[in-house]
Amino acid sequence: MNEAKKTKYWHIEPNGRIQCDLCPRNCTLKNGQRGLCYIRGAENNEIVFYSYGKSSGFCVDPIEKKPLNHFYPGSSVFSFGTAGCNLACKFCQNWDISKSREMETLIDYASPQDIVDTTLKHGCQSIAFTYNDPVIFLEYAQDVSELAHQNDLKTVAVTAGYINPGAREDFFSFIDAANVDLKAFSDDFYSKICGAHLDPVLDTLLYLHKETNVWFEITTLLIPDENDSDEELNAMTEWIVEHLGPNIPLHFTAFHPDYKMVNKQNTSHQTLIRAQKIAKSKGINFVYLGNVHDSTRSSTYCPKCDELLIERDWYQLGSWGLDSEGRCIKCKTHIAGHFESSHGNWGRHREPVYIHRIK
């Protein structure tokens, strides 16, 4: 197992410190120090990556869990992550992995070939880089993706989109679909609660829309009294329609108290419904609710004739109203996304997978 892998996203400052250029955090380090993400650090006057080939776990999931509702619905996806994160969100729902400062979190080892072979063995259509942000394990994800594409597999990134322009171009060059976590529409929120800034995330969304063929959807976790005001939701959804268009699927998901925000209340179902109404009133065609059981508001409808196109009960799919070309069977409106002639049948279950246990 490799303990450290060389990277190319860095430079040496005049004062001798080594700056990591992967993300807008631009950590400037002395030899022996690690960046905020923890799995990248300075060694021998360069930035190296410490968790190549190591994972916090592997699992076969429904693609809707990413969440991606317009990317081969009903299919299964082989999912994995490493440890660490380049944001510092106080509400993190995967904090045991993404906020880990212990390499012991990495319990499984797998080469890129191991991952592709296991994905094929389990009959998955795609591989997802998820659980923690794949931006920080870019080199590992890239090597997996190259082999995946050689075997007709798709690749999925679940990311906060916090990445610098040079690395951004490299990262998304090997990604087929992404779910980008737009945590709020306020730089104050990003600064105080995530230790980051909003503009780089918006830049990533604009880049994906204008410069790539990556299919992407957006998720916003609504936190009571933090990012759920009518004013902010109006501003966010207006920006999405103006800059990305009306057909980018938007997922509003419910917060539950965790990590450093355990005193907050759960997001109410009514708050999610209110957010969905605002987004639709601004012209977004596909708005979904997540982390709650609401089949009606989690299903897909034709934006022209309101025909039920994809029925969802949690991650279980039911009625299918698309033809073989991804059009509404009633009015023939083309629906944005990647679809096959019928939905997959993986359903709602998840299947943990072990490849080479480290301990």
Image (spheres, helix red, strand yellow):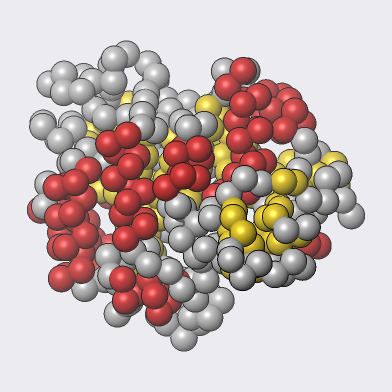
- Residue 209 in the image: state x and y as whole percent: 29, 38
Name, please, the residue furthest toward the right.
359
Residue sitting nearer the eye, 63 or 31: 31
Which residue occupies the foreground of this view, 294 or 50? Answer: 50
- Residue at image x 46%, y 60%? 24
Is any part of residue 62 visible from this angle? no
Q: Nearer the viewer, residue 178 or 316?
A: 178
Depth order, front residue of 167/189: 167
Q: Is residue 355 left or right of residue 64?
A: right
Q: Residue furthest top?
A: 324
Q: Residue furthest bottom?
A: 263
Would you say 247 lies left or right of 356 here?
A: left
| Place of residue 262 in the rendered image (x, y in percent of width and height, measured from the top left) | 51, 82
Total marks placed: 0
* Residue pictured at 62% horizontal, 59% vertical: 12
Quadrant containing the N terminus is: top right
Instruction: Examine the image and state in which quarter residue 53 appears.
Output: top right
Q: Is residue 235 above or below residue 91?
A: above
Residue 236 appearing in the image: yes
Query: Where is residue 188, by image quadrant?
Result: bottom left
**In the displayed structure, does residue 216 sit left or right of residue 346?**
left
What residue is rendered at 70% in x and 70% in y? Answer: 30
When the figure is inspected, residue 237 is found, relative to residue 75, above or below; the finding is: below
Q: Position of residue 8 (x, y in %)?
A: 62, 45
- The quadrant holding residue 94 is bottom right
Q: Is residue 127 above or below residue 255?
A: above
Quadrant (top left/top right/bottom left/bottom right) for the C terminus: bottom right
Residue under the point 21% across and 73% down: 229
Residue 103 x %, y %:
78, 62
